[in-house]
Amino acid sequence: MLKCREVTALASDWLDGDLTTAQKLKVRLHLMMCRHCRNLVDGLATTERIIRDRLDAELPIPAELQQRTTEAIEARLRTDQSGRN
């Protein structure tokens, strides 16, 4: 059976479905027997879901931030172009 530190190292791959069949079975067996690791994996899954939901939501970019970013990029481009001449 895997040790907790091994399951911790495999947790992200477990959630992403990137483990071999043998690894999946070993992790599943450990999670069935270890409440601590189950809580860890559940917490990671919740965190990933929250982040994914936030990234998927179409949040408007404030006009002031867009303007400042555009001005900064344009200023940088002018500086780069003047340095090449």
Image (cartoon, rainbow, N blue to C red):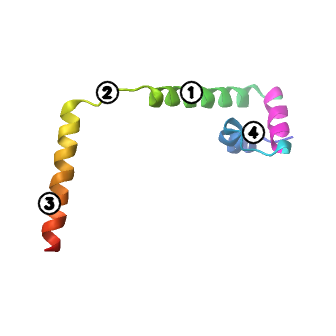
Amino acid at circle 1: Arg
Q: Is residue 2 magenta?
A: no
Query: In the structure shown, which secondary structural element does the residue marked by tag 3 occupy?
Result: helix
Give above or below for 80 relative to 57.
below
Q: Are marks 1 and 4 in contact (CB under 8 Å)?
A: no
Under mark 3, the amino acid is Arg
Please give the residue where the numbered disc 2 appears in the rendered image.
Answer: 60
Who comes first in sequence, dot 3 or dot 1? 1
Residue 78: quadrant of the picture: bottom left
Q: Is label 3 or label 4 in front?
A: 3
The residue at the point 18 percent across, 41 percent down is 68
Up/down of 58 relative to 25, above or below:
above
Residue farthest toward the bottom in the current orientation of the protein:
85
Q: CA distance from mark 2 to mark 4?
A: 42 Å
- Give the residue displayed 17% in from the left and 66% down from the top: 81
Position in image of residue 60 (x %, y %): 31, 27
